[in-house]
Each structure stands twice: as C-alpha cells, then as structure tokens.
Image (spheres, grey):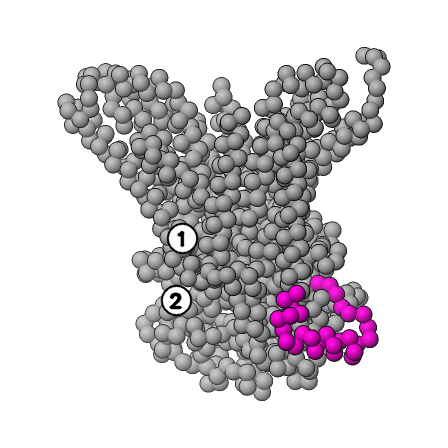
C-alpha cells in the first residue's frame, strides 16, 4: 500500500509516456513487455501443443483407425474398443452418480433441517472434490475390485468414478437449486402442493441447466481420467460385448481412450498411434467445452 | 420436464449406441472371418457341450503381451462368445491378482517364488522366453559376457569403453520391482538387491522405447518384444534367438506361466482357455508371437 | 404442531428416497476418508513414524531387508510442486493480467477458449508430449544419461497448472471494482502501475487461491509425471530420476501383495498425500473466507 501512496504523490501528468521519471518509465515499459511476453509464451505453448499433437497424430487418423480393433492375426490397428469403453464408462458412471448426486443435493437443500450437519457435509464434499484421483484408484481397487469381487473391470472403475464425481455433481446441483427463488417454493407450497410435487414441478425444472452443467463437467472429468481407469478398469484393447450377458456387463475390462493412449505411449513405446488417440481426445475436449459454454450461455439468459 | 425427458432420451441413445457397438462386433466376427463359419460348424458338431460364453480376465506380465493377444484372439475366433482380456501390469501384479481373485488367470514371466506357492499360486507353463539384453542400435558393442552384464548392472562398470565401446557413460535401465523380467534377470545373474538402475520403467515396451531413444542405454526385455528399434547383444557369445532359448544354450531365459489359485475353481471359460493355451495345437501361435513353445 | 397433516404416501416415499440418496452420497464420501486413515495407520505403526517419514531409503523389493522410508517421495513432491509454482505462477499471473486488462477484448476472447481447452486436455496427453519432446531435449541440452528427471516433471506440471492459475487469477482481477483503477489513473498513475500496484493487491486473495489450487493440482497429479520422471526412488535432484508420492503409489499398488507390509506402506503414502491435500484445502478455505469478509 505504501507503494501506492508513492504513486499518488508522483507528479500528475495527463498522459503517460511524456514527463514520467526515468524509473517509472522503465517500470512501465518493463512490466508491459513482461506481460506481453508471458501472454505470448502462453499462446505459443498452446499453439505448439495443439499443433504438435495434430502434426504427429493427424496422419494416422483414418476411418479404419476409429472403427476397427487391434488384431495381431489380421494386422489391423484401431481404437474402436477404446471408444466403446469410454462410452460405457461415461454412461454407467452417470447413471449411478447422477440420480444419487441430484437426490443428495435435493435432500440437502430442500429437506435437511439441521444446518450444522448440512454445512459439515458441504465442507466434506468440497474437500473431497480436491482429492487426487490416484487415491480414488487405491480405494476403488480395494473396495470394488477386491472386497466386492468385481476384479479388474470397467464396472468397478465406473463405480469408483461415480464416487469421485459425486461431490462435483452434488455441488453444482446445489448451487443451481439455490438460484430458484424461495418465493416460488413458498407459492407452490402455499397453494397446497406437496413437497415432492413442488420439487418436481418447480425446483428441478428451474435448475435443470445447472444439473446439465454438472453432468458435462463430470463427463469431462471422466473422459480425462486415467489413474482410476488404468488400475481398476484394466487396459485390454479388444472389443467388449457388454450387453450379451450380465457376466459380460459386470466382468469386462478394457482401456478407455486415455488409458489406451497411456498404454501406447508408455507401455508399448508406440508414439504415433498414441498421438492419434491424443487428436481424438483433443476433439472430445473441445466438444465438451463447447457444450458447457452453450449450456452456460443459456443459464445466463434466464 | 421436457429437458429431463431429453436427458433421459439421450442416455437411452448412448446406451443403444453401446449396444450397437457390441452387436456389430459379433456381426463382424461372423461375417469378416472366412474361418468363422467352419469353426462354428466344428464346435457345434464336434463339441456336444453348450457353447462357451463369457469373459476371461487375465492380468500380469507385460512381456507376455504378444503371446496373450494372439492366444486370446485365436480363442475368440474359436469361441466367438468368449472375450479374453489382457491387462499388462507386471508379473508381480499377475501373481497377486491370481491369489486375491481380481483376475481369472494371473500371468508371470518367471517361476513362482516359494512364498507365492505357499499362498496357493499354481503355475502352468505356456511358453519359454529369452531375456534379451538390449542396447541402442548405434552402440558398437555386439557381445558381452554374463560377468560383464552383472558388473554393468551392479554399477561396477560404468563406461562403455570398459567393454569395448565408445567413451560414453552407461545409462542402466531396468524394470520396476514387481517385474518378472527383472526378477528372472537378476536371479540368473545373481544380482538380486544389488542392481543399480538409473531409471525403472513399468513395462517391456517402455524399456525398449527408452533404449531405442538413448545411445548410451542398456536394458533387458522379453525376446518376443525385441524388434528393429533396439539391438540384442550376444550373451557369452550366444545370440538370443528362439533356437538358442529352446536348446538352452542362451543363459538368460525364463518361462511364461499362467497362474491359478489352488482350491479355487476356475470359471468354465477360464478353464477352457487355460486348456487351450496349454495344448500342443497353439505352438505355432506362440512361435508367431516370438516366444518359444515349451517342450511337451 | 399437532395439526392434522395428511400423510401422502408418495410424499413420504420421495422424502425417504432423497434422504437415502443424501445418506449414500455422504456415506461414500466418509468411507473414503475413514478407509484411508484406517488402512494407512498399521504400516506407520510397524515401521515407526519417524523412520517412515524421515527414512531416506525406499527399497520395498529387497528380500532380506526391505526399507520403507518415504522422505525421498515427500521431498520430491514438495520440490516438484514448488518448481511448478515458481515457473507456472508468474507466467500464469501475467497472462491473466494480459487477458483481464491489457489485451484488446477481441484478442482476449480468442485466447480464453484456448486456455479452457488447455485446462480440459487429459493429463496423459501432457505426459505423452513431455515424453516425446521434453525428454530428448533435456538429455541433449544438459548432456545427461537420461532425460527422465525431476526437471522434466516440473516443466510438465508447470504447463498443467497454467490454465487454472490463469482463469482463477483473471476472475479475481476482474472482480476488483472499476473505481479503484479509475481513482489511481486519475491521480496520474500509468495503466501498468495501476494494474500492478492497485488492482493486483486488491485481488490478492483471489490470486492466492489460484496459487493454492495450482499446488493442489500439482501435488495430486500422477499419470503425467509418471511418464516423465523416471520413477527411481532417489532423493530429489533436478537432474535425477525421481518418484513422487503419487507415482510411488501408482507404480507399486498393482503388484504389492495383499496384506503385506509393502501394500500397507503404500496406503500410508496415500494417507500422507491425503493429509497434504487436506492442509491445502483448509488453506484454500481460509483464504476464500477472508476474501468474503
């Protein structure tokens, strides 16, 4: 603050540039250059990252790469299984986490009466959303693969991911539930509506955009996750037939896109297909961000 | 409410897409492969039992990747409703997951240790494999003695010029502690607990990739995974090939094993796959994967 | 209180259902905490807290005399995070100043989505680019035997925390009331002087939150740095192959035998990591609370 005071005492020129003391001029020029430099650095980094990934990955991208599986006997190389597994994990995780998360958020904001308890729970969910995924992998492996006997399987991985994404979904849902004006609730209840009826017709429709945003965030996190999927979900790269039987639904293991990338790059030293998977992931990330933006815009319009 | 329905609908659509992937897969396998029809015929006429269906999860040695993938694919062609899954996490993990039941079959590229057998692990030898000592193709060193290799990995020889190469510090690469390749390698060379690695990598391919990109590196990896990117040196004058592994003249070799747990019954599919992998019919496939079929 | 209230079975049922959801969600969350604490303690008790935390040798595979000292991991995690912060925060902060204040609005709105994209890219992609580009470059530049070093991990982490630092600091800078800046400008300070001596100090708690967030992300990252750090349990050095707390768990959890001291020690590492994260979160909460006041 004392520095601010010094600035204030400085002679008041109308425009900077002329008449500033040499020191101030240097300070101004230097910092301005630094700001531009850093911004340039960030942009250069960004362009380099995206450019390099595209440069190395695009040549390998083909319809065949996306729609076949790797086969040593037939000599094909493709990532369809990884796409399929990613889809499975996203859907199963959301099917588990979404109702639970939204339900929990509704309970916390609409039903729960003990405020100290609610605060404690909010603190807990907030804290847990910062826990590194490797710890979830550790717990998920022991709880689902080992203790519940699911073994290496995508189902166990999805359950772990559901656990990991619950805090995010609860929080975003709660935030959007809180934006529904209290008057609406009172009005509905005053007109003789039951609480569930009020929630179903007033509160949930009013906060659906927030719930969708939470979903998109969760999808982004699931698609980008690797530790849990690698250590709980396995890394096989053959096609799964999830819906053939209950056994296959519960027992199938496999690599999602991120795990496939890790396996290509790290385990098998095959950089070119790894970069091609990175291109696919980049496109997915872009789409997810776009979706979040569109929903966010809609939310603001309300 | 409309939006909720939309959401529900999109979930249903995603699910059906998943299902679509699955069913198109079975469609592929029956139409694509010319052999599939005859195989089906064979299994329906030859085997009077019900057709096999299910998933076999295998987990373990990264050295066994190509062997397992070929065996799995061949078994899937014979039994289109069975999927054999391979997860490469290292031999130690393979033994652990067979004992604690997180995988149907464990995989290891070394013999079982006594304490593992005490815990109920049972080994089934599927193939033999050499541990190739690999260097960068630019490296002029062609041959090392067992003694020299041991000294290099113990850190007693630290420069390539001591063994006839250029004046370059040696970068000693190894595998993580749970690796079967590392276990077998260190045991055969008698350097257990004495090896000093610059870096430890978590898979066979990782070692090969890093040796391939570093002129000063030395590492070890499964013979079945060694390609053109790295050079396998002669050990004691013996080249590392399928033939020298089979006749026992190549010193650093170990078995590929599948692990079950004593007293735990395998699922029907896992049992069938194990029998398939142990049968004499798969010798060609194992050779195709670069490993050596065991002497029957 | 005793007004006759018709108990609608549907209403009661839904109440129960929501309660169940809340209960399950909270139970999930609590179970993790309790599980981590309970399974983390035995190994610490067996090895001894001091030997565990301050032992400098980790040799879990030694058959005769395994040693479980995690000081190398703790220090590596601290150095790695500090390094990433030292590189990432100034660049991120200055870029945020650029985006919030200096840049023409059109330029800023073109860069922002790109930064968001950077934030959403899966961590393994960063690790992979690091493997392909950084490792050979570091090996060549410093004439090392191998490029997998703490330095590579620091650089990857610095890039990874950049987007969150940029976006959180930018939000904080934008939240400073326009009047502060106008007053400073009217008194003759230049724009740059205003941004750094008026706006930035006014936004300092938001920027601090950005830093803490960056620390949290850096200390918790596993897969990306596993791909570039070499994974040997050395005491940290900029040009040495190192293992972090996270990568120690990641690289050994799959093969450590169940019920062995080794596995329990990994859980203890998890517990130490958990405590680190908790401290960071509490720090963040304190900062945010102060900001609210």
* Disc number placed over residue B214 in the picture, else none: 2
Q: Is residue A125 visible?
A: no
Few, some or many residues within 10 Å of mark 2 (<14, 14–19, 20+)? many
Q: Nearer the viewer, residue A138 or B200?
A: A138
Choose between A91 and A115: the one closer to the eye.
A91
Q: Residues within 10 Å of mark 1 (few under 14, many from 20)?
A: many
What is the count of numbered marks? 2
User: Is C104 placed left or right of A275 in the picture?
Assistant: left
Q: Is residue C250 magenta?
A: no
x%, y% of residue A283? 47, 50
Q: Position of residue A7 (x, y in %)?
A: 25, 20
* Main SS class of the magenta portion in the image: helix
Where residue B157 appears, as percent x and y from the top left, is 41, 72
Look at the image and tell me whether residue A95 can be seen: yes
Spot occupied by residue B263 in the image (x, y as percentages of width and height): 80, 66
Who's the residue at 44% across and 65% down the image? B210
Q: Which residues are magenta?
A: B27-56
> Which residue, given by chain and number where applicable, does mark 1 sit on?
C152
Residue at image point 67% right, 64% down: B26
Looking at the picture, does residue C167 appear above or below residue A193? below
Marks 1/2: CA–CA distance: 16 Å
In the figure, is residue A78 to the left or right of B166?
A: right
Task: State which quadrant residue A194 falls in.
Answer: top right
């Amino acid at each position: 603050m004392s520095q601010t005071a010094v600035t204030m005492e400085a002679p008041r020129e109308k425009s900077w540039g002329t008449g500033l003391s040499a020191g101030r001029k240097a300070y101004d020029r230097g910092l301005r250059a630094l700001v531009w430099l850093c911004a340039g650095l960030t942009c250069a980094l960004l362009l380099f990252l995206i450019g390099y990934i595209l440069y190395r990955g695009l040549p390998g991208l083909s319809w065949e790469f996306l729609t076949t599986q790797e086969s040593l006997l037939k000599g094909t190389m493709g990532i369809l299984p990884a796409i399929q597994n990613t889809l499975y994990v996203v859907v199963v995780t959301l099917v588990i986490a979404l109702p639970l998360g939204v339900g929990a958020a509704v309970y916390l904001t609409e039903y729960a009466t003990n405020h100290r308890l609610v605060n404690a729970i909010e603190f807990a969910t907030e804290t847990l959303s910062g826990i590194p995924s490797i710890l979830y992998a550790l717990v998920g492996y022991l709880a689902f693969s080992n203790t519940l006997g699911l073994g290496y399987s995508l189902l166990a991985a999805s359950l772990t991911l559901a656990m990991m994404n619950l805090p995010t979904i609860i929080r975003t849902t709660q935030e959007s539930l809180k934006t529904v004006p209290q008057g609406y609730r009172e009005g509905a209840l005053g007109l003789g509506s039951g609480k569930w009826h009020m929630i179903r017709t007033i509160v949930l429709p009013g906060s659906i955009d927030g719930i969708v945003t939470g979903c998109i965030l969760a999808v982004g996190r699931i698609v980008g996750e690797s530790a849990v999927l690698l250590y709980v979900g396995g890394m096989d790269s053959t096609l799964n037939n999830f819906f053939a039987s209950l056994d296959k639904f519960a027992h199938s293991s496999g690599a999602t896109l991120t795990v496939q990338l890790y396996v290509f790059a790290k385990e098998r030293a095959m950089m070119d297909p790894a970069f091609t998977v990175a291109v696919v992931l980049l496109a997915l990330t872009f789409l997810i961000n776009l979706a979040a933006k569109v929903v966010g815009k809609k939310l603001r319009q309300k | 409410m409309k939006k909720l329905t939309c959401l529900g609908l999109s979930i249903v659509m995603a699910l059906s897409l998943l299902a679509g992937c699955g069913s198109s897969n079975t469609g592929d396998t029956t139409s694509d492969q010319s052999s599939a029809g005859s195989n089906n015929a064979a299994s329906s006429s030859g085997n009077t039992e019900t057709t096999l269906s299910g998933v076999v999860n295998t987990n373990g040695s990264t050295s066994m990747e190509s062997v397992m993938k070929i065996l799995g694919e061949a078994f899937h062609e014979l039994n289109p409703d069975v999927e054999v899954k391979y997860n490469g996490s290292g031999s130690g993990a393979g033994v652990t997951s067979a004992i604690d039941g997180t995988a149907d079959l464990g995989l290891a590229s070394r013999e079982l240790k006594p304490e593992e057998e005490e815990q109920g692990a049972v080994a089934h030898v599927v193939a033999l494999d050499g541990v190739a000592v690999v260097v960068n193709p630019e490296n002029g060193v062609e041959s090392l003695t067992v003694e020299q290799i041991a000294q290099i990995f113990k850190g007693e020889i630290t420069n390539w010029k001591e063994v006839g190469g250029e004046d370059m510090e040696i970068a000693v690469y190894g595998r993580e502690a749970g690796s079967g390749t590392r276990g077998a390698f260190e045991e055969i060379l008698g350097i257990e607990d004495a090896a000093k690695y610059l870096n430890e990598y978590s898979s066979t391919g990782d070692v090969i990739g890093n040796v391939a990109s570093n002129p000063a590196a030395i590492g070890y990896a499964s013979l079945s995974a060694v390609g053109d990117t790295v050079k396998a040196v002669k050990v004691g004058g013996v080249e590392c090939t399928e033939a020298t592994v089979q006749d026992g003249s190549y010193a650093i070799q170990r078995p590929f094993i599948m692990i079950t747990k004593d007293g735990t019954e395998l699922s029907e599919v896992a049992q069938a796959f194990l029998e398939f992998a142990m049968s004499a019919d798969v010798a060609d496939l194992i050779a195709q994967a670069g490993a050596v079929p065991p002497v029957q | 209180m005793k007004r006759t209230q018709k108990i609608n079975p549907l209403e009661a049922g839904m109440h129960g259902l929501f309660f169940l959801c809340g209960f399950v969600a909270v139970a999930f969350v609590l179970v993790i905490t309790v599980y981590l604490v309970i399974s983390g303690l035995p190994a610490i008790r067996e090895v001894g807290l001091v030997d565990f935390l301050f032992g400098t040798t980790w040799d879990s595979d030694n058959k005769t005399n395994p040693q479980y000292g995690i000081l190398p991991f703790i220090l590596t995690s601290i150095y790695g995070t500090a390094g990433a912060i030292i590189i990432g925060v100034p660049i991120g902060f200055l870029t945020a100043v650029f985006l919030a204040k200096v840049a023409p609005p059109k330029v800023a709105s073109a860069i922002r989505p790109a930064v968001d994209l950077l934030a959403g890219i899966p961590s393994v992609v960063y690790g992979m680019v690091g493997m392909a580009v950084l490792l050979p470059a570091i090996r060549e530049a410093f004439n090392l035997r191998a490029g997998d070093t703490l330095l590579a991990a620091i650089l990857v982490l610095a890039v990874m925390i950049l987007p969150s630092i940029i976006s959180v600091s930018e939000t904080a800078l934008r939240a400073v009331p326009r009047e502060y800046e106008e007053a400073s400008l009217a008194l003759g300070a230049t724009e740059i002087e205003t941004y750094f001596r008026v706006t930035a100090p006014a936004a300092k708690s938001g920027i601090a939150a950005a830093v803490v967030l960056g620390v949290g992300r850096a200390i918790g990252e596993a897969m990306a740095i596993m791909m570039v750090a070499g994974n040997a349990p050395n005491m940290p050095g900029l040009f040495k192959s190192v293992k972090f707390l996270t990568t120690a768990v990641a690289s050994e959890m799959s093969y450590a035998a169940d019920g062995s001291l080794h596995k329990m020690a990994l859980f203890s590492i998890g517990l130490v990591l958990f405590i680190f994260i908790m401290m960071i979160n509490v720090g963040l909460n304190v900062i945010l609370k102060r900001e609210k006041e």
